[in-house]
Image (tube, rainbow, N blue to C red):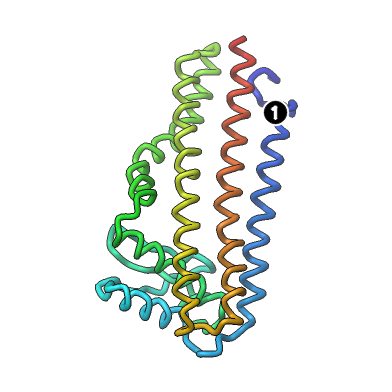
């Protein structure tokens, strides 16, 4: 049982480390958003107002802004060219909400300018969907069939695509935050003393993507260790 990685062997520590990192990152972003969500922007504009202003100034008047349910479920959909702001962002006039809205506008601008990492990430989506759905089942079937190395190797390579996708996501997210901070630093929506608050919110949000990449990479490493040992 230990050989197949189902027990609590040394490699299981990698999963625990990844889980701890992910939980901390999730707590950190929520902590910072709640902290700076208490600060109403001096200009009194909402997240939706800020998004509309940024998009219009970037020549993206065609992009529709929608309100979606949930907390921090904000996203830009390049497929239908819509900016979706969560309930905690859309109507809020907090510094945190404006920062999140500006970040999503950063993705819209990336789409407009054909930002290369964003294009690469989009191209990886079909393969990543296959990898996330088929990798573990293939590895399990390979193990059950007496350590079928071909199936296990294919499963591990498919799982590696998920790691690659998350690594490619990092420059996309950091770049969107950088664009947001640059726009908000102009003083048209936030005052100079509010910009550091936005930086803190967006930095903590970016760490969740770093944590996800590390956690998934540790899972991949565990699979390699477990089945590498069994092959030997």
* Quadrant of res 80: bottom left
* Quadrant of res 217: top right
Task: Give x and y (percent) for residue 191.
Answer: 55, 84
Identity of the residue furthest to the bottom in this view: 43
Helix, strand or loop under label 1: loop
Determine whether, in the image, residue 150 is placed left or right of residue 143. Answer: left
Q: In the displayed structure, would residue 195 be above or below residue 103?
A: below
Task: Name the image quarter holding the C terminus.
Answer: top right
Task: Name the image quarter holding the N terminus.
Answer: top right
Give me the residue at 51% from left, 24% from top: 139
Q: In the displayed structure, would residue 155 be above or below residue 194?
A: above
Give me the residue at 44% from left, 30% from top: 158
Q: In the displayed structure, would residue 210 be above or below residue 104?
A: above
- Neighbourhood count class around disc 1 (C-alpha, 10 Å): few under 14, some 14–19, many 20 upward: some
Task: Give x and y (percent) for residue 20.
Answer: 70, 47
Determine whether, in the image, residue 65 is placed left or right of residue 217. Answer: left
Give me the residue at 35% from left, 45% from top: 120
Identity of the residue furthest to the left in this view: 62
The one nearer the camera, 77 or 70, is 77
Determine whether, in the image, residue 231 is placed left or right of residue 104. Answer: right
Give me the residue at 58% from left, 24% from top: 224
Task: Give x and y (percent) for residue 43.
Answer: 51, 90
Q: Which residue has dot 1 on it? A: 11
The one nearer the camera, 216 or 107, is 107
Q: In the displayed structure, would residue 224 be above or below residue 201?
A: above
Count every numbered label the image shows and give the total: 1
């Amino acid at each position: 049982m230990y050989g197949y990685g189902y027990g609590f062997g040394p490699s299981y520590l990698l999963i625990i480390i990844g889980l701890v990192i992910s939980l901390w990152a999730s707590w950190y972003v929520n902590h910072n958003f709640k902290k700076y969500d208490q600060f109403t922007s001096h200009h009194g504009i909402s997240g939706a107002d800020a998004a509309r202003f940024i998009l219009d100034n970037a020549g993206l008047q065609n992009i529709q802004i929608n309100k979606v349910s949930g907390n921090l479920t904000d996203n830009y959909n390049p497929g239908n060219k819509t900016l979706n702001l969560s309930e905690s962002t859309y109507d809020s006039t907090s510094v945190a909400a404006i920062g999140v809205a500006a970040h999503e506008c950063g993705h819209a601008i990336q789409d407009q300018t054909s930002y290369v990492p964003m294009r690469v990430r989009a191209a990886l989506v079909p393969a990543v969907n296959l990898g996330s759905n088929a990798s573990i089942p293939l590895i399990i079937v390979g193990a059950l069939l007496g350590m079928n190395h071909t199936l296990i190797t294919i499963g591990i390579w498919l799982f590696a695509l998920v790691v690659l996708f998350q690594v490619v996501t990092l420059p996309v997210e950091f770049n969107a935050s950088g664009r947001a901070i640059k726009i908000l630093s102009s003083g048209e929506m936030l005052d100079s003393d509010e910009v550091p608050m936005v930086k803190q919110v967006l930095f903590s949000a970016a760490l969740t993507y770093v944590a996800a990449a590390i956690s998934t990479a540790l899972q991949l490493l565990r699979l390699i260790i477990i089945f590498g040992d069994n092959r030997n």
